[in-house]
Image: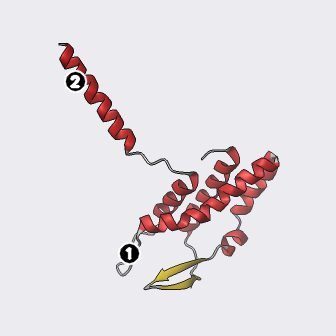
Amino acid sequence: MNGTRLALAASALLSLFVLSGCTQPGTSAERESRHYVYAADDGFDPNFRTNKADTARMMVPFFDQFWQAGKKDRDAGLTAEAVRQRVASYTSDEFLASVRGKTSFAGKDYDNNKSVSTQERKAMIAAITTTYMDGYQGRK
């Protein structure tokens, strides 16, 4: 009877360790980058396939700058009203129009001048503001 309980407890602990080893919490910038890439995907283009894992990895520095800005603002002692204004500025059309990227295709880099879809715009605003607030609130 004791051997059965010991085996059962050992298998439960092993399962717990295996499952907890599979989680990848990452930083706020990594989480929001991954979330943005999947949320902004418009879903269908038969002639083009995006490598989402690589795209998310390459977007981490973009979102990390907002985390760093949030941390800097917290360290500077910005008031809650100033933080709200900063977040509101990230949702403005002027700010989103200023965000330009580069597209790499067949070994060449191209300026990305295409218009941003509503779905992509919402995903970007959500990711930027969440990452900024994570930095401001001290969440990794």
Please name the colour scheme applied to the rendered image: secondary structure
Query: Residue 61's x, y, as percent?
Result: 59, 64
Residue pointed to by mark 1: 49
Farthest top residue? 1
| Pair 1/2: label in front | 2
Query: Residue 56's x, y, as percent?
Result: 49, 64
Circle number at residue 37: none
Above or below — where is 21 with respect to 62?
Answer: above
Residue 78 visible in the displayed image: no
Q: Quadrant of the N terminus?
A: top left
Mark 2 belongs to which amino acid? Ala
Identify the residue shown where x is 30% and y is 34%. 15
Query: Residue 44's x, y, as percent?
Result: 39, 73
129 lies left or right of 10: right
Q: Nearer the viewer, residue 91 or 69?
A: 69
Above or below — where is 51 with respect to 10?
Answer: below
What kind of element bears circle 1?
loop
For residue 66, which quarter of the picture? bottom right
Q: Residues within 10 Å of mark 2 (few under 14, many from 20)?
A: few
Q: Nearer the viewer, residue 20 or 3?
A: 3
Query: Residue 62's x, y, as percent?
Result: 61, 65
For residue 99, which quarter of the picture? bottom right
44 lies left or right of 137: left
